[in-house]
Image (cartoon, rainbow, N blue to C red):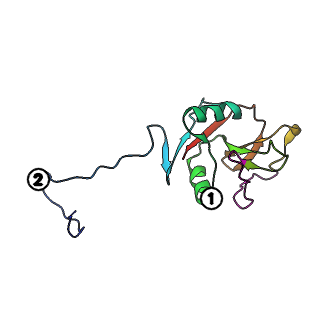
């Protein structure tokens, strides 16, 4: 690429040229999207919602908070065949879903499965994202998880 005009040109590979390197913002095992890095737990790497939240904090991250429909679409495109904990809970009041930072869940962002959230047995206060939609589960249940570093 010419420094003066910005135009591209092919040249002999043996010619010494200046060069530009690109470095990923995310460490190995993490995926980048926009200005954030995401860690999707691997198969067999399952934790309770509480343990997943603690693990993410140890990695200087948080359970994923999804901000908009584009991010939701990207996260959903990364899912395997299982559910993953995200930073969503209604512990502060049944049916009042909020993110870990206290931001309320926007109704147009939610992608609940049909019949969810249902607070089955009065004991489902943590949100998971899964193929086919979101679900509420008991926070003690062991699931995959998604950490997000801002």
Image position of 107 (left or right of 6): right
Give the quadrant of the N terminus: bottom left
Q: Secondary structure at mark 1?
A: loop
Whether the magenta-drawn stretch holds residue 85 is answered as: no
Q: Are marks 2 and 1 in contact (CB under 8 Å)?
A: no
Q: Please say whether residue 113 is one of the residues in the magenta stretch.
A: yes
Which label is found at residue 68? 1
**Residue drawn at (73%, 54%), measured in percent from left and top?**
105
Mark 2 or mark 1: which comes first in sequence?
Answer: 2
Q: Residues within 10 Å of mark 1 (few under 14, many from 20)?
A: few
The answer to whether residue 81 is left or right of residue 141 is: left
- Label 2 sits on a secondary structure element that is loop
Camera-side residue of 32 and 43: 32
In magenta, the rendered stretch is 99-115
Q: CA distance from mark 2 to mark 1?
A: 46 Å
Q: Position of residue 9 (x, y in %)?
A: 19, 64
Q: Which corner quadrant of the image does residue 138 belong to?
A: top right
Give the residue pinned by disc 2.
Answer: 15
Q: Looking at this rendering, what residue extends furthest in the right direction?
A: 121
Question: As drawn, is 114 to the left or to the right of 60?
Answer: right
What residue lies at 44% left-to-right and 37% top-to-bottom?
A: 28
């Amino acid at each position: 690429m010419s420094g003066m005009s910005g135009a591209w040109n092919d040249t002999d590979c043996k010619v010494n040229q200046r060069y530009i390197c690109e470095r990923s913002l995310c460490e190995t095992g993490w995926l980048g999207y926009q200005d954030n890095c995401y860690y999707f737990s691997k198969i067999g790497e399952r934790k309770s919602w509480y343990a997943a939240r603690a693990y993410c904090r140890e990695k200087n991250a948080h359970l994923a908070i999804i901000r908009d429909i584009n991010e939701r679409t990207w996260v959903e495109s990364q899912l395997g065949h299982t559910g993953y904990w995200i930073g969503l809970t209604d512990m502060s009041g049944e049916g009042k879903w909020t993110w870990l930072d206290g931001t309320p869940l926007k109704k147009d962002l939610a992608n609940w499965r049909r019949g969810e959230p249902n607070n089955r047995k009065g004991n489902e206060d943590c949100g998971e994202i899964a193929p086919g939609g979101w679900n509420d589960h008991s926070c003690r249940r062991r699931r995959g998880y998604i950490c997000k570093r801002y």
